[in-house]
Image: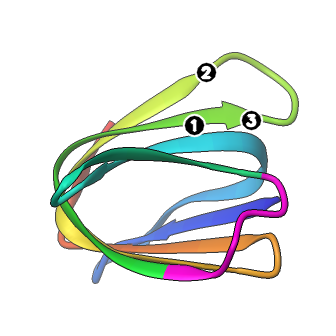
Amino acid sequence: MYLEIITPDKRVFEGDVTSVKFPGINGGFEVLNNHAALISALSNGPVRITPATGAQVEFRIDGGVVEVLDNKIIVLAESVNA
Protein backbone atom coordinates (compact mmCIF):
# COMPACT_ATOMS: atom_id res chain seq x y z
CA MET A 1 0.00 0.00 0.00
CA TYR A 2 1.06 3.59 -0.52
CA LEU A 3 0.51 6.21 2.19
CA GLU A 4 0.61 10.01 2.02
CA ILE A 5 0.13 12.27 5.05
CA ILE A 6 -0.42 15.89 4.08
CA THR A 7 -1.04 19.08 6.10
CA PRO A 8 -1.91 22.52 4.72
CA ASP A 9 1.80 23.39 5.01
CA LYS A 10 3.68 20.31 3.76
CA ARG A 11 3.79 16.63 2.93
CA VAL A 12 4.75 14.89 6.19
CA PHE A 13 5.09 11.26 5.05
CA GLU A 14 4.94 9.26 1.84
CA GLY A 15 5.93 5.70 1.14
CA ASP A 16 4.99 2.04 1.04
CA VAL A 17 3.46 0.60 4.21
CA THR A 18 2.07 -2.74 5.39
CA SER A 19 -0.43 -1.32 7.92
CA VAL A 20 -1.64 1.96 9.41
CA LYS A 21 -3.62 2.51 12.62
CA PHE A 22 -5.81 5.61 12.82
CA PRO A 23 -7.66 7.48 15.60
CA GLY A 24 -11.19 7.51 14.15
CA ILE A 25 -13.83 9.76 15.67
CA ASN A 26 -15.77 6.65 16.77
CA GLY A 27 -12.70 4.66 17.82
CA GLY A 28 -9.44 3.47 16.36
CA PHE A 29 -9.18 1.34 13.24
CA GLU A 30 -6.48 -0.29 11.14
CA VAL A 31 -6.01 -0.36 7.36
CA LEU A 32 -4.26 -3.34 5.77
CA ASN A 33 -3.46 -4.28 2.17
CA ASN A 34 -6.54 -4.62 -0.10
CA HIS A 35 -8.76 -2.79 2.41
CA ALA A 36 -12.23 -1.81 1.23
CA ALA A 37 -12.61 1.76 0.00
CA LEU A 38 -13.51 4.25 2.74
CA ILE A 39 -13.51 7.88 3.77
CA SER A 40 -13.43 8.66 7.48
CA ALA A 41 -13.03 11.63 9.81
CA LEU A 42 -10.10 11.41 12.21
CA SER A 43 -9.84 12.70 15.76
CA ASN A 44 -6.77 13.93 17.62
CA GLY A 45 -4.34 11.12 18.34
CA PRO A 46 -1.57 8.89 17.06
CA VAL A 47 -1.25 7.49 13.55
CA ARG A 48 0.90 4.34 13.81
CA ILE A 49 2.60 3.34 10.57
CA THR A 50 4.32 0.05 9.83
CA PRO A 51 6.49 0.76 6.78
CA ALA A 52 7.23 -1.95 4.22
CA THR A 53 10.85 -1.72 5.41
CA GLY A 54 12.03 -0.38 8.75
CA ALA A 55 10.69 0.21 12.23
CA GLN A 56 7.24 1.46 13.19
CA VAL A 57 6.71 5.24 12.89
CA GLU A 58 4.21 7.32 14.84
CA PHE A 59 2.80 10.78 14.12
CA ARG A 60 0.34 12.67 16.31
CA ILE A 61 -2.39 14.42 14.32
CA ASP A 62 -4.88 17.11 15.30
CA GLY A 63 -7.87 15.80 13.40
CA GLY A 64 -8.39 15.36 9.70
CA VAL A 65 -9.76 13.02 7.04
CA VAL A 66 -8.50 9.76 5.54
CA GLU A 67 -9.36 8.25 2.16
CA VAL A 68 -8.54 4.63 1.25
CA LEU A 69 -8.90 3.56 -2.38
CA ASP A 70 -7.11 0.89 -4.44
CA ASN A 71 -4.28 0.37 -1.92
CA LYS A 72 -3.57 4.11 -1.70
CA ILE A 73 -4.16 5.98 1.57
CA ILE A 74 -4.31 9.76 1.71
CA VAL A 75 -4.49 11.55 5.06
CA LEU A 76 -5.35 15.24 5.12
CA ALA A 77 -4.47 16.37 8.64
CA GLU A 78 -5.04 19.73 10.36
CA SER A 79 -1.51 19.52 11.81
CA VAL A 80 1.04 16.82 12.61
CA ASN A 81 3.58 16.41 15.41
CA ALA A 82 6.30 13.79 14.97
Q: CA distance from mark 1 to mark 2?
A: 6 Å
- Image x and y of residue 45, in percent: 19, 41
Q: Which residue is mark 1?
A: 49
What color scheme is it? rainbow
Q: Amino acid at mark 1?
A: Ile
Label 3, secondary structure: give it: strand
Does the residue at mark 3 contact the one at mark 1 (Cβ under 8 Å)?
Answer: yes
Label 2, secondary structure: give it: loop
Sequence-first tag of 1 and 2: 1
69 vs 67, left or right, is right
Report the magenta residues as a range.
33-38
Does the residue at mark 1 contact the one at mark 2 (Cβ under 8 Å)?
Answer: yes
Sequence-first tag of 3 and 2: 3
Q: Residues within 10 Å of mark 1 (few under 14, many from 20)?
A: many
Q: Which residue is mark 3?
A: 51
Residue at the image point whose x is 69% and y is 16% from the top: 55
- Image x and y of residue 81, in percent: 24, 43
Q: Which residue is mark 2?
A: 56
43 vs 70: above or below: above
Q: Is residue 40 magenta?
A: no
3 vs 56: above or below: below
- Image x and y of residue 78, in percent: 18, 72
Does the residue at mark 3 contact the one at mark 2 (Cβ under 8 Å)?
Answer: yes
